[in-house]
Image (cartoon, helix red, strand yellow):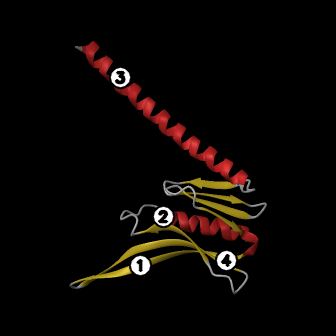
């Protein structure tokens, strides 16, 4: 009976190791693909982030930023930071009233680039949209983190 328990435990442990190795390989593949995509667009990233919804990389020397939508990899956005005046993380909330209480629900989180050219339309990178996902996690923190990183380069 003890030998059966040991064999089952070893089997479960082996499956966990295989799953962890597979996840690590997928993450490495995403990183390698993003870095290669950055090189194709002339970027050498000093910092980057690979998320579930997007990949973002900063090239401080160029200076520029590259953003790739993970759900639609053909959606690639490159921003020349030498033309950017300011970067701002914005949170859009909707007021929901229920009898005697008011609740604010975050409906969008964006990273907005305002350009030096006053005639240029601000460019927005969406981190969260309630129409695409009901569950919000760390998108606001990520947007604020990248706002700080980008503004330090400007």
Q: Which mark is residue 139?
A: 2
* Up/down of 137 relative to 81, above or below: above
* Residue 60, horizontal then vertical, whole percent: 74, 61
Tell me if residue 19 comes above or below residue 68 in the rendering: above
Q: Residue at x 68, y 60 (%)?
A: 58
Query: Which residue shows up at 39% across the image and 69% down it?
Result: 130
The Cα atoms of the two marked residues, 1 and 3, are separated by 48 Å
Location of residue 57 (image quadrant)? bottom right
Say above or below: 26 vs 153.
above
The residues bearing labels 4 and 3 have C-alpha atoms spaced at a distance of: 54 Å
The alpha-carbon separation of the residues under discs 4 and 1 comes to: 22 Å
Residue placed under numbered mark 3 in the picture = 11
Image quarter of the C terminus: bottom right
Compared across the picture, whether 81 is left or right of 74 comes to right
Task: Please name the residue that numbered disc 1 is placed on.
Answer: 93
Up/down of 27 relative to 140, above or below: above
Mark 1 secondary-structure assignment = strand
User: Which residue is label 4 attached to?
Assistant: 86
Quote the CA–CA distance across marks 3 and 2.
Answer: 37 Å
């Amino acid at each position: 009976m003890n030998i059966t328990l040991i064999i089952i435990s070893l089997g479960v442990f082996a499956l966990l190791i295989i799953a962890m190795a597979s996840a690590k390989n997928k993450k490495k593949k995403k990183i390698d693909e993003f870095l290669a995509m950055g090189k194709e667009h002339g970027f050498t990233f000093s910092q980057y982030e690979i998320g579930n919804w997007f990949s973002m990389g900063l090239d401080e020397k160029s200076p520029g930023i590259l953003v790739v939508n993970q759900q639609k990899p053909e959606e690639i956005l490159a921003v020349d930071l030498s033309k950017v005046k300011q970067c701002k993380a914005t949170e859009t909330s909707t007021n929901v009233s229920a009898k005697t209480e008011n609740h604010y629900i975050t409906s969008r989180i964006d990273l907005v680039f305002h350009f030096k050219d006053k005639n240029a339309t601000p460019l927005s990178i969406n981190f969260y949209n309630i129409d695409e996902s009901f569950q919000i996690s760390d998108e606001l923190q990520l947007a604020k983190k990248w706002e700080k990183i980008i503004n330090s380069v400007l």
